[in-house]
Image: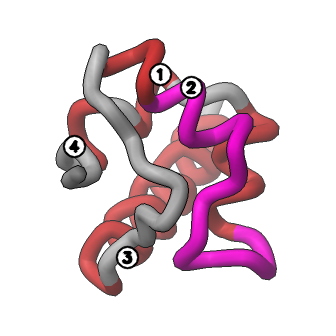
Amino acid sequence: MTLPPIREWWSALSLEARVDVLGESAPQLNERTREEIRTITGAVVGMKETLSDEDLEYARSETRSEIADEDSD
């Protein structure tokens, strides 16, 4: 099983799932987050899926960008 590209599901993840992705368990994904990714993408997401360094950097970058956008409003 292969995790779908993060660009396909990151923006649709709940805040809780995003915290999980960037939290202490990174690069591992918990069941709730895997289920959200399955729901968003329709892909089979295995129990042992992990995020690559590039995926984690994308998530961090997107989060910084979202925070900056909110600060400028």
Q: How many marks?
A: 4
Whether residues under marks 1 and 2 lie with C-beta atoms below 8 angstroms apart, the answer is yes
Secondary-structure class at tag 2? helix
Label 2 neighbour load within 10 Å: few <14, some 14-19, many 20+: some
Residue behind mark 2: 36
Labels 1 and 4: the sequence-earlier one: 4
Q: Quadrant of the C terminus?
A: top right
Labels 4 and 3: the sequence-earlier one: 4
Q: Quadrant of residue 27?
A: bottom right
Secondary-structure class at tag 3? helix
What is the C-alpha distance between the residues marked 1 and 2? 9 Å
Labels 3 and 2: the sequence-earlier one: 2
Amino acid on which the number 3 mark rests in the picture: Glu
Residue behind mark 1: 12
Residue behind mark 3: 57
> In front: mark 4 or mark 3?
4
Q: Is residue 11 left or right of residue 20?
A: left
First to last magenta residue range = 23-37
